[in-house]
Every structure is written in structure tokens, then in C-alpha cells.
Amino acid sequence: MRISTNMIYSSGTNGILNNQAAQLKTYNQITSGRRVVTPEDDPVAASQVLINTQAQEVNKRYMENQGQAKDSLKLVETQLNSVVNALQEVLDKTIQAGNTTLNDANRVAIANELEVRLKELTAVANSQDGNGHYLFAGYQSTVRPFSDPPDIPPPPPGPYNNTNPYVTFEGDQGIRELQVDASRQMEITESGVDIFMRVRDRNGNVSDQSVFDTMKNLIDTLRTPVANDPVAAAALPGAISSALDDLYAAKDNAVSVRSTVGAKLAELDSLASASSDIDIQYSSIISDLRDLDYASALSDLSKQQVQLQASQKAFMSVSSLSLFSML
């Protein structure tokens, strides 16, 4: 077999270039910290990395939604705590108003305090989140859901009921949701209608008036003079007793909704823990597929350097062989 000088040069050059390319590939792997830098390095591993990376990103979106849902529900829970506390103070004042030793002036003073609580309760019902969305307006989150009660002038015109509400509701009964897991959409608001307007009694029956109307009727009753009116005096205990029943129902209803919110928050904690574990698993899988074994890579680099040096020396030795040097 005849080997030309051109073949020797071509073969030697290709060998050196191949060794340099292999050394550059290993160098790129070391500098990037990845075994799979491009899909051609390992097509199967590259495709698996892509699949797991996409799944990890979806899981991270769920984790973000879980955080948003938790923030929203914590705010709802805080406002429901305010509702429960306000109703408890109203109950205390109502029980005090039932004391038969009180006169008309004393009851009017209590009515004035209850009017302040009524406005406080309406303000809580109109509370907003950090984005300016009303918590209890349903899907109409940009609409102020409950009208502000005007000052109550004595003597009152009452009584009020759902056909003639003292505080009107302008929102809807929608409950906003977030996708917090692949198979779980969680409600992040509560219905203002169910909390304030259609209060359920202890038997689960919907009462005929809102908590605002209950308080308005009670204020009207306490501001009605009974000192010289035997009929009004006889009706006063029954009116206070009825108001107490409605207020206890409203408080129980708010406590029940608050418990539901607390259960959702506990579920979100469990989902967040599971999602965090899944995120770690995805990271581990991706690392196993893509990340570099530095000890092996450095060993390969050293071997490739020796191979390159050897090929260069061999090329120099072979290329110096020529008949012309013997003449």
C-alpha cells in the first residue's frame, strides 16, 4: 500500500483536530458544570431533562398560586375575626340593654354605640385586598359590595327586611378560585351574601333579614321611648330576645365560615409541603441526567491533553520522514 505525503499530513491534521475538539467539549462541560451541554451530547437524557424541566415549571406555578391563595385566605380569615369580635361586642351590649333597670336614656346610649358597631361591620364587609379588590363582592371584585349605612335619625321609621334593606348588596354570589394543584381548584374568597345578607340560624334555616337589618331594628327599638308607653314597654323584651337570636345566628355563621377558611389554610400547608418535595425530586432527576461528574471529567481532560500532545509529537516525527532528507 502506497501512502502519500499528502495522506500523512491529512491524517495527522485530522487526528490533532479531533483531539482538540474532544478536549474543547470536555472543557465546556467543566465550565458549565453539565454533562449534557447540547442535545447531541446525549439525546435521550436531553429529552428527559426537557420533560422534567417543564413539569417542574408547572409545579412552581402551582406553588405560586398556593402562596397567593394563602395570602388571600389569611386576609379573609382576619376580616372574619373582626366580624366575630364586632358581633360579640354587639351581643354584650344587647344583653346589657335587656337589663330592666335601664331607662330610656341608657338604652339610647347603647343604641349610639351599636350604630358605631354597625358602621364598623359595614366597613369590614367592604374590606379590600392589596390589589384593591373587594373580598366579599364575588366576581364583581371592583364594585363596592355593601352600601354605607346613613346616620340613623331618631325616631326611626323601621322595621326593615330583605324587601326593604337598610344596607344593600351590589356584588354577586361568585367565589373566586385558583388552581393550586393539578386536580384542585381552591376558593380564595367567601360569599358576602351568605355571611352578611342571608344569615342562617342554628337550625340551618335562612333568616328573613341581614345582620345589618337586625342591628338596625335593634337600634330602632332601643331608641324608642317606653317610659310612658306600656305597649312599647311590653314589646321591648321580646324585641331584644329576637335580636339576640338573630345576632347569635350571625355570629355562629361567621364562626362557621371562618372554620372553613381555616381548613383551607391547613390544606394549603399540606399542598405546599407536597409541592416542595416534588420540586426537590424534579431537581434531583434533572441533576442526575444533566450534571457533570467533575472527577471523571477532569480525568478525561488530563487524558485528552496527553493524547493531544502525543499526536502532535507523532505528527512531527512522521512528517519529518522524507526521501529528500536522505539525498
Image (cartoon, rainbow, N blue to C red):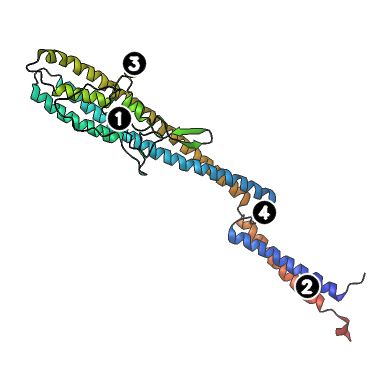
Q: Earlier in the sequence, mark 2 or mark 3?
A: 3
Does any portion of residue 52 appear in the rendered image?
yes
Callout 2: SS? helix
**Which residue does the image show at 55% across and 42% down from the upper left?**
281
Left or right: residue 318 compared with residue 178: right
Name which residue lies at 63% across and 62% down: 28
In the rendered structure, find residue 314 and report the number of the disc placed on it. 2
Q: Earlier in the sequence, mark 1 or mark 2?
A: 1
Of 41 and 164, which appears nearest the observer? 164
Q: Secondary structure at mark 3?
A: loop
Separation of marks 3 and 4 at Cα, in angstroms: 66 Å
Tell whether label 2 touches label 4 (CB within 8 Å): no
Task: Give the quarter of the image for residue 318.
Answer: bottom right
Q: Earlier in the sequence, mark 4 or mark 2?
A: 4
Q: What residue type is disc 3 on?
A: Asn
Type of amino acid at the residue the image marks with label 1: Thr
Q: Which mark is residue 39?
A: 4
**Label 4 amino acid?**
Pro
Q: Is residue 276 visible?
A: no
- Residue bearing mark 1: 168
